[in-house]
Amino acid sequence: MNRLLRKSCAPALPWVAALVLWNGLQAQAPNPAESPRSLANSGRYEDAIDAYEDALAQGGGPEVRRGLIRTLAEVGRYAEAILVGRSAPGAEAGSVANALGEVLYKTGQLDAAREAFSAAVEAQGSGATVARLNLAIQEHEYGDRAGSLAKFDVFIDIYNGARQLPADELFAVATAVKYLGIRDGVLFQDALRAYDEAIAADPSDFRAQVMVGRLFLEKFNGPDADAAFRAVLRRNESHPEALIGLARAMQFNGTPGVMDQIDAALEVNPNLVEARIMKGLQHLGAGNHEGAREEADLALEVNPASLEALTLLAASHYLLGEVSEYTRIKSQVARLSPQYPEMFNTLADLAVQNRRYRDAVELATQAVELDPLSWRGWGLIGINQLRLGEIEAARTNVEKAFQGDQANPWFKNTLDLMDTFENYETTEDETFLLVLHDREAELLRPYIQEVARESYEALRARYGAYTPPLPIRIEVYPSHADFSVRTVGLAGIGALGVTFGSVVAMDSPSARPLGEFNWASTLWHEMAHVFHLGLSNHSVPRWFSEGLAVHEQRRAAPGWGFPTAPSFIRAYKQGLVLPVSELDNGFMSPQYAEQVLHSYYVSSLVFEFIEGRWGFDPILAMLHGYGEGRSTEEMVVEYLGIGMDELDESFDEFLQLRLARPLKAIGDTRESTPPQGDPLIYFPRISRENPGSFVAQMGAGRAFFDAGRADDAEKYFRTAVQLFPTYAGADGPFWYLAQIHEGRGELEQAANALTQLNSLNESHYEARLKEADVREEIGDVGGAAQALDGAVTIYPYEIALHERLASLNAGLGNLDNVVRERRAVVALDPVDRAEALYRLGRAQLDVGDLSGARRSTLDALEIAPTFDAALELLLEIRGGGTR
């Protein structure tokens, strides 16, 4: 039976409404005089400690001693705080025992902490209720997790049996109810309500306010968590727990600057174990095991019993394959806490970050064996089974997770997604299992099969005839939200595709606005990951795999892969682009908004540099080496013959040479006056004042182009090409030059300009159509067909595009391609479907597919029984295809 907080008749507050109320309480907080507590609450900790010590010396009672203990602890001066607590006279010992116990607990002195909490409960004075909570928490973390729930349950009776509770007891009730939420999700809302009551009872005690932020994070509400922590920091910008809470919210929300925020918390409290662990996990995510272990050791110096710090240390050994050390630490954790599942859940999460999805399932299974109420564990099992293509097992385990935690959007979204799987068609052969939505499967299937097969054969030959586990499952989602859920469980991911090993998921071309991406380029990128993950036993670093995949895109087709963006040039000039030795940080802990995209680009150039200087063999050897647990540093020495420092320096020299012209052309543009007046006067003046500025030359060119003065515009666009020849923007100089040449009838030059643009930009749909027009007009039918084939890789949903391709391929004698394009027309459900089916039947007959031709022709006649041309074609088919 559910046991809820009953005293208040008000319903449990919705999350956002509760935060509004809570923020209102903050605005009404009193402004007390400069008491020790007010000094601490404003972040003036040293002054507060001095004031508390003066008050204590003048005979201050237990309240003063408790305040001093907590203030010392807040800045990490734990030994001093313990000394203050233990020096309490006998009459005060019981009143300060809970505060003492909390510091002992923070420093891993578990037996002493338990004794202090018990003494506080026995004294039945101030802090007794919170001490009872702390005993339950200690039991939950280090003892009998299931048994601890009964101890938490008592707090509901405490709340319901009291007319009014002080702030600290309301805090205890809220926290206990939060723990009980593992059995009944409704109780999380009750916990939030009790925290709000605690804040109202004492707005100057920030503990409940910080817990509100943590509770929002637990319930996947990142924006409100961020707001909650910032509300505390507005009153005390140095509050360490609010600072580290904000770091967690920033990480959840994808806000840059997480590491700086962690360091801000550590500046106030260098012994804040939570911050050390979070910083260590950041290092671990970037592959910096030395940094991760250093942070774990610092945390364990403060608290040798920290399960989270031991987990961090174990994770480093696990990821590096250091079995004996991992086993030793795992045993140490088991002795401290026999039922602690979060070690395995955390390891499972880290395995996912390292794309070791099978490991994640095995680790999360160990978590739920220790604690069957670990809904996080059940979810990790199910979602990673889904990533492995084990659909039915995944559904069973995600359903179990959702039954236990129905507020978890990760679980709900995944179940909703799996409910849509009935709308997908599957096509399987020895190599691929293609999963396409039924409303576009007929259209997309032949194109995706073609690119998948081409990429598979090319990559297999390049990677030493390696065969990844087959079949390779390729899922294509017409809803980007569904793809996001498939990838991370939540909507909003910025990626276009993701690879889980031999399972690839990606956006359909219909999932993105026209011109936003090239689906074929994306599929090639993901197929490269299939090989990288397989060859490295899923142990390749993120920067290596992503950079190499973009490098493979560029090798596959002109224009594919990340282009040279002006924003990258600016970041490089500002010193923001990381060296090779630190590139994983750009993916795992970005420090500015575009750093992930820039990291893709610069990582790809690393492989252009390596292959150009040393060949491809060292790259292939390094992939194998990662699978053997070897480090980048040792393999760089062995296979490239240089150290990481030299690689950093050599690559930077390569980068400066490769980007020499854009580095000069992109920067600050001097403007003598703000933009005003006649653009034909203003922009040419700016271009004269900034002759080496790409932006200035483009501005002048556009001004003259828009005014219809093409001849004047041309010289500026040609200068822009000289300054930044690899600029790939849709509005770049090649686009305007093509229009200028076409307007003059200079069709060869227009075609060449469009070819140059399309060799830089993989997703400029209009430019490909325009190039096809121009090339067809000058008689280059093959070039026109090639341009339109490129358009199909961007947006294959225009009937006219496929009609035109069918006609061009017929003229070229590419009859198989004619069939493909006629199928596409039928799949797009044209107005005259009978005519489209007839034309498909004719194309099928031309390639000798009598069976297919018969089906298509009969389908046409079913729609239009008196269709003369179709009747004649049917007779021809029955005659064996002879006219």
Image (cartoon, rainbow, N blue to C red):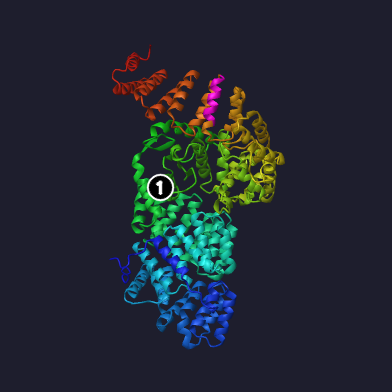
The quarter holding residue 165 reads: bottom left
Q: Is residue 444 visible?
A: yes
Q: Position of residue 839 (x, y in %)?
A: 39, 21
| In this picture, residue 869 sits left or right of residue 249 | left
Q: Position of residue 741 (x, y in %)?
A: 61, 26
Q: 818 or 517: which is nearer to us?
A: 517
Establish if 747 lies above or below 872.
Answer: below
| In this picture, residue 626 sits left or right of residue 405 | right
Q: Position of residue 70 (x, y in %)?
A: 51, 76
Q: 511 or 12: which is nearer to us?
A: 12
Which residue is rendered at x = 51% and y = 51% of the image?
354
Residue 184 lies in the magenta stretch: no
What amino acid is found at the position of numbered circle 1 in the picture?
Answer: Leu
Judged from the image, the secondary structure of the residue bearing numbered disc 1 is helix
Establish if 444 lies above or below 272.
Answer: above
Q: Is residue 341 visible?
A: no
Q: Magenta span: helix, strand or loop, mainly? A: helix
Establish if 595 lies above or below 883.
Answer: below
Establish if 193 lies above or below 881.
Answer: below
Query: Dot 1, crowdedness within 10 Å: few (<14), some or many (≥20)?
Result: many
Which residue is rendered at x = 38% and y = 23% of the image?
836
Q: 782 or 132: which is nearer to us?
A: 782
Q: Magenta residues, as a range?
A: 767-778
Residue 768 lies in the magenta stretch: yes
Q: Which residue is mark 1?
A: 386
